Amino acid sequence: DARVTQTPRHKVTEMGQEVTMRCQPILGHNTVFWYRQTMMQGLELLAYFRNRAPLDDSGMPKDRFSAEMPDATLATLKIQPSEPRDSAVYFCASGWPLAGDQETQYFGPGTRLLVL
Amino acid sequence: AQSVAQPEDQVKVAEGNPLTVKCTYSVSGNPYLFWYVQYPNRGLQFLLKYITGDNLVKGSYGFEAEFNKSQTSFHLKKPSALVSDSALYFCAVRDIRGYQKVTFGTGTKLQVIP
């Protein structure tokens, strides 16, 4: 049963520290999304990649957030420096819109981040 | 610009009764429409989608949704609710033209009362 995996599942850190979240998309999927979920803002799209190239990162605060795909099996989201307002659940999702399973996104379990 | 609205923050229904979770959308062209469900402390799970074809779409766990172009709606329905259906439900839309990112609604919390 193929799944999107995310590490760590939980992260508590102090303001100013660097945070790195990792995502392993489903093997063969060529599109990866990063979302942030909070009670106040709901689900926000931060960035997405297709074939490892960033297509849209307009939802991401550029001064402190960065997203990369070093290879097809790994996506990373970094926050440096972290702030308390970054506390949220961060989800990664993957998909393969050119395949028969058109447009469906498969979500990982999320990384719950708390910045003190 | 595309958008999706879920007018109800919360829906309560008794177990065994039919349920409806409402969704309306706005796109310039024709839409792709989706429903996802989120259980506590979990990621979103795909339920069903409308791409083309029949307006009535059947999905997982007995859910279905009806695409109504004239009313720009895509309401989620189930004939008989289960307590285990209690969760957060998200509607999502994207314009089929070009490649646009999917826009998610704010979510509707469904509570099924035993």
Image (cartoon, coloured by chain):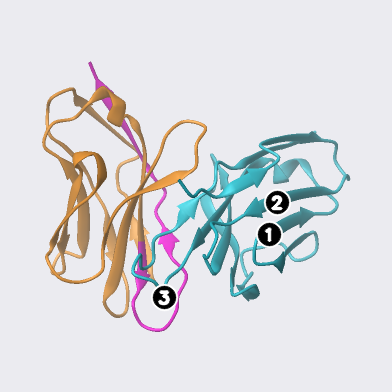
Chain colours: A cyan, B orange
Q: Quadrant of the N terminus of chain B?
A: bottom left
Q: Which mark is residue A22?
A: 2
The amino acid on which the numbered mark 3 sits, given as a three-letter code, is Leu
For label 1, the SS is strand
Q: Do the residues at discs 3 and 2 belong to one chain?
A: yes
Along the line of sight, which residue is nearer the eye, A39 or A104?
Answer: A104
Q: Which residue is mark 1?
A: A74
Percent x, y of residue A56: 60, 73
B100 within the magenta span: yes
Q: Which residue is mark 3?
A: A98
Chain letter belonging to callout 1: A
For label 3, the SS is loop
Specify the quadrant of the image occupied by residue A72.
bottom right
Disc nearer the start of the sequence (2/1):
2
Q: CA distance from mark 1 to mark 3?
A: 20 Å
Along the line of sight, which residue is nearer the eye, A105 or B106?
Answer: A105
A73 within the magenta span: no
Q: Residue at x 68, y 59 (%)?
A: A74
Chain letter belonging to callout 2: A
Magenta span covers which residues? B93-114
Which class describes the residues within 10 Å of circle 1: few (<14), some (14-19), or many (20+)?
Answer: some
Disc nearer the start of the sequence (1/3):
1
Mark 2–mark 1 contact, CB under 8 Å?
yes
Which class describes the residues within 10 Å of circle 3: few (<14), some (14-19), or many (20+)?
Answer: few
For label 2, the SS is strand
